[in-house]
Image: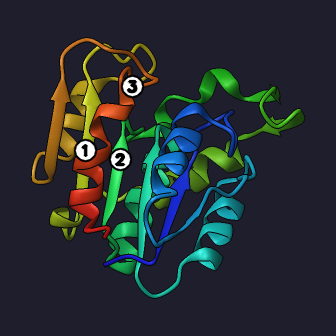
Amino acid sequence: MPKRIIYVHGFNSSEKSYKAVRFGEYMADYDVDYCVPRLNHEPLQAIVRLEQLITANTALIGSSLGGFYVTYLSQKYSLPAVVINPAVRPFELLDNYLGDNYNPYQDSHYKLNSRHIAALRRLFLPQLHTPSLLYLLQQTGDEVLPFQQAVKYYSQCKQLIEFGGDHSFIGFEHTFASIVDFLKIT
């Protein structure tokens, strides 16, 4: 039973993302430490920050790029995790973002370069070692990431696939009970 839930936001997002806030409100009725750290655009800094927050009995939730990070950490530390419309191979998708960027949710300017892409490539796990630790929430209407890639990559995991929707995961609130059940939150 987890005592800490870490929610990991996606690329160009923040700790104030809609899903993070809504799930945090839901978690107020449970005896858990719910945290949503603000992550740096630098992948290795983001991973180090998340590793600093991991304690005994931690569970993870990640959306989009956060799902990619959560997958890596789940498999490295044997932690249960929920991934929401996750990026499976983000290093193949970020070429259009190389150069100067602005994250309006963090009000920060940054430069994405090939070193960041290489760091993401190094974090990729070609095969999940313990797929039973992961629960995929995927909507087929995701306009940002190829949903088929996630369904295939997480094929040995528990899955909730919904037709339609979008990258934000429309109706996220209706998945809360299944998330709590999967993570064994009491």
Name the residue rendered at 38%, 76% in the picture: 2
| First along the sequence among labels 3 and 2 | 2
Describe the element under mark 2 as helix, strand or loop. Answer: strand
Along the line of sight, which residue is nearer the eye, 2 or 31? Answer: 31
Q: Three-letter amino acid code at disc 1? A: Leu
Along the line of sight, which residue is nearer the eye, 168 or 110? Answer: 168
Separation of disc 1 and disc 3 at Cα? 12 Å
**Extreme residue in the front direction:** 29
Nearest to the eye among marks 3 and 2: give it: 3
Q: Where does label 3 land, which residue?
A: 169
Q: Where does label 1 land, which residue?
A: 136
Q: Residue 150 lies in what quarter of the image?
A: top left
Q: Is residue 94 above or below residue 184?
A: above
Separation of disc 3 and disc 2 at Cα? 11 Å
Image x and y of residue 116, in percent: 67, 48
Name the residue rendered at 55%, 43% in the picture: 20
